[in-house]
Image (cartoon, rainbow, N blue to C red):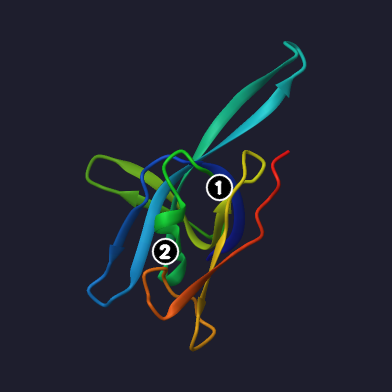
Amino acid sequence: MSDTITITGLIATTPRHVVTSEGLPITSFRLASSQRRFDKATSAWVDASTNWYTVTAFRQLAINAVPSLSKGDRIVVTGRLRVRDWQTDDRTGTNVEIEAETLGHDLFWGTAVFTRLVALGGDSATTAGDESAQAEPAEAAVPV
């Protein structure tokens, strides 16, 4: 079973990009999502526990993630949640994975510059290094 989930968090590992022998691009990284709450007794914000996720992106999303995301970035992820229990001879655990459908920077923490990649011959996006593509920069935000 898989559920769709949206998570905000911090990229905790350098995104790893591979292309399988079948040509499938995959980018993955670990995401730390911490909750904060206001403690009325101390009148201060305190950190609650941190949830850890393995985020995996495929195909064009994986290709676009490589130049866009870095360790330490605060992002928003929407995707399919998978929780899997595992066991070895002496250990057991649970992996919590998100197969990303969308990825983006969390603009609460800063600004971003977006470059849309457009294929000249069709509707599908292509990489910036592809000579058949042209980049269309989005409108720049005015700093406040």
Choose top left, top right, bottom left or bottom right for residue 22: bottom left
Question: Disc number at residue 5?
Answer: none
Above or below — where is 42 with respect to 111?
A: above
For image coordinates 44% across by 75% down, the residue present is 126
- Residue found at the very far bottom of the displayed protein: 121
- Given residues 27 and 87, the one toward you in this image is 27
Q: Quadrant of the C terminus?
A: top right
Choose top left, top right, bottom left or bottom right for residue 136: bottom right
Amino acid type for the residue under numbered disc 1: Ile
Of the residues under marks 1 and 2, which one precedes in the sequence?
2
- Given residues 50 and 76, the one toward you in this image is 76
Please give left or right for residue 23 compared with residue 144 in the image. left
Please name the residue that numbered disc 2 is placed on.
62
- Given residues 80 and 102, the one toward you in this image is 102
For image coordinates 22% across by 45% down, the residue present is 89
Please give left or right for residue 45 compared with residue 30 in the image. right
* Place of residue 68 in the rendered image (x, y in percent of width and height, measured from the top left): 46, 54
Q: Secondary structure at mark 2?
A: helix
Please name the residue that numbered disc 1 is placed on.
75
> Callout 2: 10 Å neighbours few (<14), some, many (20+)?
many
Amino acid type for the residue under numbered disc 2: Ala
- Given residues 32 and 132, the one toward you in this image is 132
Q: CA distance from mark 1 to mark 2?
A: 15 Å
Above or below — where is 51 with respect to 119?
A: above
Please give left or right for residue 106 compared with residue 17 in the image. right
> Callout 1: 10 Å neighbours few (<14), some, many (20+)?
many
